[in-house]
Image: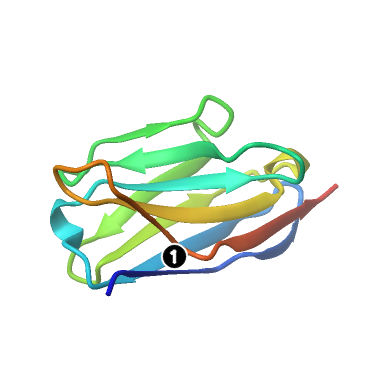
Amino acid sequence: QVQLVESGGGLVQAGGSLRLSCATSGTLFSISPMGWYRQAPAKQRELVARITSGGSSNYADSVKGRFTISRDNAKKTVYLQMNSLKPEDTAVYFCNLRWPLSDVDYWGQGTQVTVSS
């Protein structure tokens, strides 16, 4: 059974930092592409950052230079370090795992990030 559990969200002032974690189980984590997405109220879910099994990453333009995605294959966990947070970063953040060599996606339950001005 595949499980993705996010943690680390919360309320922070603009300019602050948060670190999100997504612990997985029942997965082929080390060979799975991973990603972080977010969804603000009344908006579509959007990609924030992705990281390949080999460690290559890419980011949405809106977070480049402020957010960093990383992974720990031994812990089967992916992280999102968020610095210089802005009110427009407020959203529910979701962890995503793409099953290797497939188009099957798994999602966590989401963690709320709220940035106050």
The residue that disc 1 covers is: 21
Quarter location, residue 8: bottom right
Picture coordinates of residue 32, whole percent (x, y): 20, 51
Task: Report whether 103 appears left or right of 62.
Answer: left
Task: Report whether 15 appears left or right of 64.
Answer: right
In the image, residue 25 above or below residue 93: below
Which quarter of the figure is the N terminus placed in?
bottom left
| Figure colour scheme | rainbow
- In this rendered view, identify the residue nearer to me: 55 or 65: 55
Picture coordinates of residue 60, whole percent (x, y): 50, 29
**Label 1 is placed on what type of residue?**
Ser
- In this rendered view, identify the residue nearer to me: 111 or 44: 44
- For the residue carrying disc 1, how many other residues have a C-alpha within 10 Å: few (<14), some (14-19), or many (20+)? many
Number of marks in the rendered image: 1
Furthest residue in direction right, as rendered: 117
Picture coordinates of residue 23, whole percent (x, y): 36, 70
In the image, residue 3 above or below residue 86: below
Task: Report whether 3 appears left or right of 90.
Answer: left
Instruction: Identify the element where label 1 is drawn.
Output: strand
Residue under the point 57% across and 54% down: 93
Picture coordinates of residue 26, whole percent (x, y): 23, 72
Furthest residue in direction top, as rendered: 61
Residue under the point 38% across and 46% down: 35
Residue under the point 52% across and 65% down: 109
Residue under the point 85% across and 47% down: 117
Task: Report whether 84 appears left or right of 47.
Answer: right
